[in-house]
Amino acid sequence: MTRHFLTIFDLSREELLGVLDRAAELKALRGTPAHPQPLQGKSVAVVFEKASTRTRLSFEVGIHELGAQPVTLNSKDTQLGRGEPIEDTARMLSRYVQGVVYRTFGHDRLEALARCATIPVVNGLSDKFHPVQLLADLMTIRQNFGPSLEGVRVAWIGDGNNMAHSWIASAAVAGFELVLACPPGYQPDEQVLAEARARGAKVRVVERPEEALDGVDVVTTDVWASMGQEGEATERQRAFSGFIVDDVAMKRAATDAIFLHCLPAHRGEEVSASVIDGQQSRVWDEAENRLHTQKALLEWLIV
Ligand code: CP
Ligand code: NVA
């Protein structure tokens, strides 16, 4: 059966930990003759309807390191950008390549691609979820606090957006404790929360950062205006006033707490330069871990 990776909910806990274990192995083997090339002779398409730096780089490099050829398509210079249906794109891609990574707006477009494709589909970010980022974030947490994710306490400070939803799904699958501080009007999707809670997630949503931060192991945030919301930037800056992760906020967390951010970041808005560039920040390990975790994911999905 063809498996897809559209949200973290698509994996069992055992599968998630298996991908993270394999990512650590691939990191250790990187650059050595023992590094495997399980996708030799294959091709994987990486399709973008939104901007990207890390997702493009990490998938292109990772696909190449697994022995396959990455084929990157930007919608604006393909027929997708001229209105070719996503369903037809899925059928066509399935005849050429062995997997597809897709970054788009509406999550329904990813679901339509997966429904009509006969190859694995990976969510490279939608308006609702960014699950490949969470694989990297969870790998980074394990590098700092050990392999068991249960018992780790995470605070999300900011918008109830695609990253927040991915943290919520991850709390359900991995079993860590999550508190999200989101201002009224910017709270996470109730259905995502309900699905996570139905799977046993320990998740709370509060309205102020001070209610979320005490003693946590991980503090994380994201931009206040995501891709496609640029026109709301000014009203969002007002709504998120007081939500900056700065030194005062980090002092509420555990003394050995780490700071994560999927990037790109806006210093002086959601995070201070002193925090993102400071001792507790792990954002560069986190960005690197995109490569290792996505290689493990693609190997698991395609081989
Ligand atoms: N974090 C992340 O997905 O970065 P890009 O938008 O640069 O791909
Ligand atoms: N929430 C952000 C994440 C970027 C990687 C966005 O969707 O733009």
Image (tube, grey):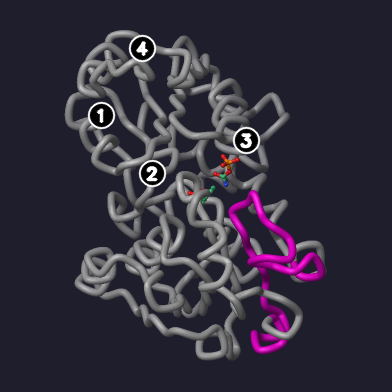
The residue that label 3 is drawn on is: 53
Callout in the foreground (4, 3): 4
Drawn side of residue 89 relative to residue 36, left or right: left
Q: Please name the amino acid that badge 2 sits on.
A: Ser
Marks 2 and 3 sit apart, C-alpha to C-alpha, by 15 Å
The residue that label 1 is drawn on is: 113
Q: Please name the amino acid that badge 3 sits on.
A: Thr
Drawn side of residue 223 relative to residue 189, left or right: right
The magenta stretch spans which residues? 250-275
Residue at 58% over, 90% down? 214
Marks 4 and 3 sit apart, C-alpha to C-alpha, by 22 Å
Lower sequence index among marks 2 and 3: 3
Position of residue 281 measured from the top left corner of the image (x, y, whole percent) = 73, 65
Q: Please name the amino acid that badge 4 sits on.
A: Gln
Lower sequence index among marks 4 and 3: 3
Picture quadrant where residue 186 is located = bottom left
Callout in the foreground (4, 2): 4
Marks 4 and 1 sit apart, C-alpha to C-alpha, by 15 Å
Residue at 34% over, 60% down? 13
Position of residue 80 measured from the top left corner of the image (x, y, whole percent) = 35, 18
Callout in the foreground (4, 1): 4
The residue that label 4 is drawn on is: 79
- Magenta stretch holds residue 80: no
Label 2 SS = loop
Lower sequence index among marks 4 and 1: 4
Q: Please name the amino acid that badge 1 sits on.
A: Leu
The residue that label 2 is drawn on is: 126
Task: Work out whether residue 149 or residue 264 is closer to the camera in this orientation and state it.
Answer: 264
